[in-house]
Image (tube, helix red, strand yellow):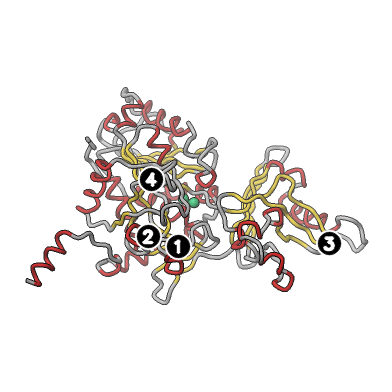
Amino acid sequence: MEEKTKMLKEKLFRKSESGWYTSPNLDEIFDYAEGYIDFLNHSKTEREAVKYFKQKLDENGFKDICDVTSLAPGDKVYYINHHKNIYAAIIGSEDFKEGFNIIGAHIDSPRLDLKPNPLYEDTSLAMLKTHYYGGIKKYQWLNIPLSMHGVFIKKDGEKVEVNIGEDENDPIFTIADLLPHLSNWQEKKKLSEAIDPEKFNILVGSMPYTTEDEKDNVKLNVLSILNKKYGIVERDFVSSEIEFVPAFKARSLGFDRSMVAGYGQDDKACAYPSLTALLKQENLTRTSICILADKEEVGSMGNTGMSSHNFEYFIQKLMEKTNTKASIHEIYKNTLVLSADVTAAYNPNYQDIYEKNNESYLGHGLSLIKYTGSASKGGASDANAEYIGFVRKMFEEKNIAYQNSEMGKIGVGGGGTIAYILADRGMNVVDCGISLLSMHSPYEITSKFDLYNAYLGYQTFYQNAETFKD
Ligand code: MN
Ligand code: MN
């Protein structure tokens, strides 16, 4: 009798367990994570991620689509959009009208951007004013080591790239927080009001240019150093994109080294598997595309965000160079998409925020998320059941670990991804990324099992040769 009950449970119950129990390929998992950690340490901004991935694409036989006149099955191409966003594709043997297999992730992350006139001196300290980018819990960004990344465009058009604070011999920067001894007033405030973003001024110098006691000599010294090294003047800040990000190195986390702690894992934890999975592909039936978008953290707008028509420019180029006659709408209608973005992992420190039956858990595999959004499902990208059925079958046949979840209890918050933008274009889309702890913090946490499982799952998706009919 007992055996019968056990078998029936086995047959009928949904299973959710840590992938570490059954994972056969521990060496591959840990090796893959080493590559990922190296990627994180060299790609803290969207521009740096583009450079890193461009090199990988070049090494793996991908060509800039602007340099090829025609495309045939097996050909590999990419398009780099304004240095901050990549579309990469492998041409399949099937006609485009059957649709593409697309995996879309984003490579921008929350950070501190500089204001257009950032540099000033106050009481013999040189400071840089910032304007934060993306949703951050402000207290997490105070008194941590920050590094400076980005570009200046000088008056003559020359572009100067800057990266200070990553090398062990570089200086770092920080925002000086108030000492607890003088914080009684602040402790009484609501968390959202306790830290004023206008006080997000980064300390960058304290030595005067000369020994003469004159106004702004410390500011002058900072500018003089920047001028010597990069040839820039104060006005050049107006045509710059300078991002301050945590200077921490990504590291293995835990006695068992099973996790990765590092900055920018939203959404580089999905971007890396999305692209490295594409690099492995040959002889595809359906054309596969990897999107690495910018500006997701602030609404996906602009000419490098997912809403940009420059994506259509890329698709148009693919169509022209393959002599495709089908309409772009027909292609889109038949296109299959995984929106590869991270979701919240259940955090044991905050049990009452989560609804345990419907959360993602670190180490339990890819999160297949039917809908995002908030309390009323407002703004949700809600995947069709038929399409989710198609995707889960694909995963289950290849033993890809997946879980299905929401993000927290109803009404505690919410979020979105690029999913709705592609769904608006008529494509079949479901959110499918990995879960992380401490999202948007300077030091986010992922599971190495989930990363490798995403890599395998995304490969399975690119290899899918079936057309989806519902
Ligand atoms: Mn994200
Ligand atoms: Mn995010």
Q: Tell me the SS state at disc 2.
A: loop
Looking at the image, is mark 1 or mark 4 earlier in the sequence?
Answer: 4
- Dot in front, 3 or 2: 2
Q: Left or right? Give the position of 415 relative to 207.
A: left
In the image, 98 versus 193, the foreground residue is: 193
Spatial CA span between label 1 and label 4: 19 Å
Secondary element under disc 4, as helix, strand or loop, is strand
**Image marks 3 and 2: residues in contact by CB distance under 8 Å:** no
Q: Is residue 291 left or right of residue 163?
A: left
**Picture coordinates of residue 252, whole percent (x, y):** 45, 69
Q: CA distance from mark 3 to mark 4?
A: 49 Å
Residue 437, label in figure:
1
Look at the numbered disc 3 and give the secondary structure of its residue. Answer: loop
Find disc 2 in the rendering and name its residue: 355
Number of the label disc, if any, that sits on residue 124? 3
Q: Residue at x 29, y 36 (%)?
A: 73
At label 1, which amino acid type do we have? Leu
Q: Residue 391, position in %: x, y?
A: 26, 46
Q: Would you identify the image quadrant in which residue 126 lies? A: bottom right
* Nearer-the-camera pick, 249 or 154: 249
SS at circle 1: loop
Of the 4 image quadrants, the one containing the N terminus is bottom left
Q: Residue furthest left?
A: 1
Q: Give the numbered dot on residue 339.
A: 4
x 64%, y 58%: residue: 164
Q: Nearer the viewer, residue 215 or 60?
A: 215
For marks 2 and 4, give the one nearer the viewer: 2
N-terminal label among 3 and 2: 3
Q: Amino acid at mark 3?
A: Ser
Question: Toward the viewer: 118 or 322?
Answer: 118
